[in-house]
Image (cartoon, helix red, strand yellow):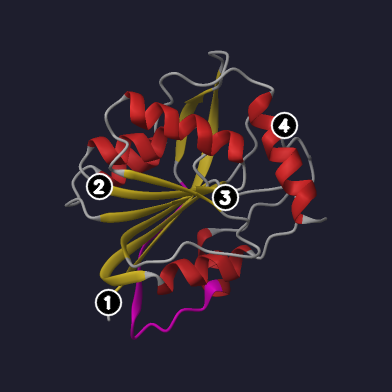
Amino acid sequence: MSSTDAVTFWDGVYAARPPATAPRPNVRLTEMVTDLPPGDVLDLGCGDGGDALWLARQGWRVTTTDISAVALERLTALAQAGGLGDRIAAERHDLRDSFPEGEFDLVSAHYLHTPFDLDRTAVLRTAAHALRPGGLLLVVDHGSTSPWSWVQDPDIRYPSPQEIAADIDLDPVAWTVERSDTPHRIATGPNGQTAEVIDHILLIRRTA
């Protein structure tokens, strides 16, 4: 489908719900990034903005992107209201066509799923090449379908972290897989419901 269709869909998703006033960061992000020294981070797919705001509060300089102007406008307003406007640069990109410029110490891609055609492998490969030496690419994907997900296809198959790493096909001389596993956790949905879910975690470091 066209870029216009994707923009219309995602703008509609965010416009259909009230703006988040205190969006939460993703659990895996806080688990894995808290002890890292802050630097420049790229947040792929900001959504309600919980990850970008949390990272900025930890001292990171955040470039965040989304296809939805509604999501970006809401995040920008929250950043300014929280005194973080100078630490967060929100850019609209359809990752099928464009990618943020710059070099980063961390690229975070949490649940970068869409019902539209997206060459995720190419996006993640580009993200890996945007890392500075020593930088980390953190990819966290769904490994199961939560009851509140907008995807309720019983036949959906979630690729393993090992499969994703193989598809990205980075030169092991310059990139090293530091973590590749599928932990379970209890997640809380938007209306307070809980369910056990599986995350697929892939952590890659650029070594050269």
Q: For the view shown, which residue lies furthest in the right direction?
A: 1
Residue 169 located within the stretch drawn in magenta: yes
Tell me which numbered mark, 1 or 2, is placed earlier along the sequence: 2
Query: In the figure, is residue 83 to the left or right of 47?
Result: left
Distance from Cα at disc 1 to Cα at disc 4? 41 Å
Query: How far apart are labels 1 and 2 at the CA level?
Result: 21 Å
Mark 1 secondary-structure assignment? loop
Residue with the mark numbered 2: 60
Q: Is residue 49 visible?
A: no
Residue 95 position within the rendered picture, expressed as x and y whole percent measured from the top left: 60, 60
> Which of pointers 1 and 2 indicates the residue nearer the eye?
2
Tell me residue 23's x, y (percent).
Answer: 43, 25
Q: Is residue 169 above or below residue 197?
A: below
- Residue 185 seen in render: yes
- In which quarter of the view is residue 134 placed? bottom left
Q: Nearer the viewer, residue 205 or 72?
A: 72
Magenta-tinted stretch: 168-182
Of the numbered discs 3 and 2, the one sitting upstream in the chain is 2
Label 3 is placed on what type of residue?
Leu
What residue do we see at 66% from left, 26% from top? 15
Q: Is residue 94 above or below residue 206?
A: above
Could you say where residue 93 lies in the image, as x and y percent from the top left? 57, 55
* Number of other residues with Cα within 10 Å of mark 3, as a class: few under 14, some 14 to 19, many 20 or more: some
- Distance of mark 4 from mark 3, alpha carbons? 18 Å
Q: Which residue is mark 3?
A: 112
Residue placed under numbered mark 4 in the picture: 12
Mark 2 is on which residue type?
Trp
Ranked by sequence position, the earlier of labels 2 and 4 is 4
Label 3 close to label 2 by CB (< 8 Å): no
Nearer-N-terminus badge (4/3): 4
Decide if residue 57 is on the left or right side of residue 157: left
Q: Residue at x 59, y 71 (%)?
A: 122
